[in-house]
Image: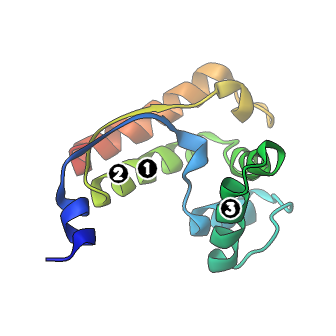
Amino acid sequence: MTTEKIIKDVPKVLLHDHLDGGLRPQTIIELANEHGYAKLPTKDPEELARWFHRGANKGNLVEYLQGFEHTCGVMQTKDSLERVAYEMMEDMKNDGVCYVETRFAPVFHIQKGLYYEDSVNAVLKGLERGKKEFGV
């Protein structure tokens, strides 16, 4: 058994996880296409993943926060918020996480007219669906 497999199989708890900080690159691209968001640095999933990792690991807050501009930019509808929350639960399960406390700021998801309550309810719907399906 490899070390990676052992680590993955150990049950984990994740506290203070930012919902808008862990989107799948492919999801970002699909949501950008769906909603006409044209500011992504690339539409190639592998290159987009590298772009996010570079920004997160440079130790530069300004560059790090640029990533959130893009993730929040594609999370402006109830459907996109629900999808991202649901996929987060699937990703947690696949990473061996048995309990997660996630957070997000609804104020960053109302730029296209969504109400605070709608954004919160959409995220809760995705989390609940994921919880039922993946047991996280």
Would you place residue 37 above or below residue 125 in this image?
below
Residue 33 placed where, x, y %? 73, 66
Q: Which mark, by number, is residue 52? A: 3
Quadrant where the image shows the C terminus: top left
Residue at 69%, 50% in the rendered image: 71
Q: Nearer the viewer, mark 1 or mark 3?
A: 3
In the displayed image of the protein, which residue is found farthest to the left?
A: 1
Residue at 18%, 65% in the rendered image: 6
Going by the numbered disc 3, the residue's amino acid type is Phe
Rounded to the nearest angstrom, the CA distance separating label 3 from label 2 is 19 Å
Q: Quadrant of residue 114?
A: top right
The mark total stands at: 3
Q: Secondary structure at mark 2?
A: helix
Q: Secondary structure at mark 1?
A: helix
Q: Which residue is mark 1?
A: 88
Would you place residue 15 above or below residue 5 in this image?
above
Q: Which residue is mark 2?
A: 92
**Left of 105 or right of it: where is 18?**
left
Residue at 59%, 69% in the rendered image: 26
Residue 11 placed where, x, y %? 19, 48
Q: Earlier in the sequence, mark 3 or mark 2?
A: 3
Other residues around mark 3 within 10 Å, as few (<14) / some (14–19) / many (≥20)? many
**Left of 52 or right of it: where is 82?**
left
Going by the numbered disc 2, the residue's amino acid type is Met
Residue at 52%, 34% in the rendered image: 122
Residue 106 placed where, x, y %? 65, 26
Task: State if disc 1 and disc 2 touch (CB < 8 Å).
Answer: yes
Q: Which mark, by number, is residue 129? A: none
- In this view of the protein, which residue sits in the foreground, 73 or 98? 98
Quadrant where the image shows the N terminus: bottom left
Going by the numbered disc 1, the residue's amino acid type is Met
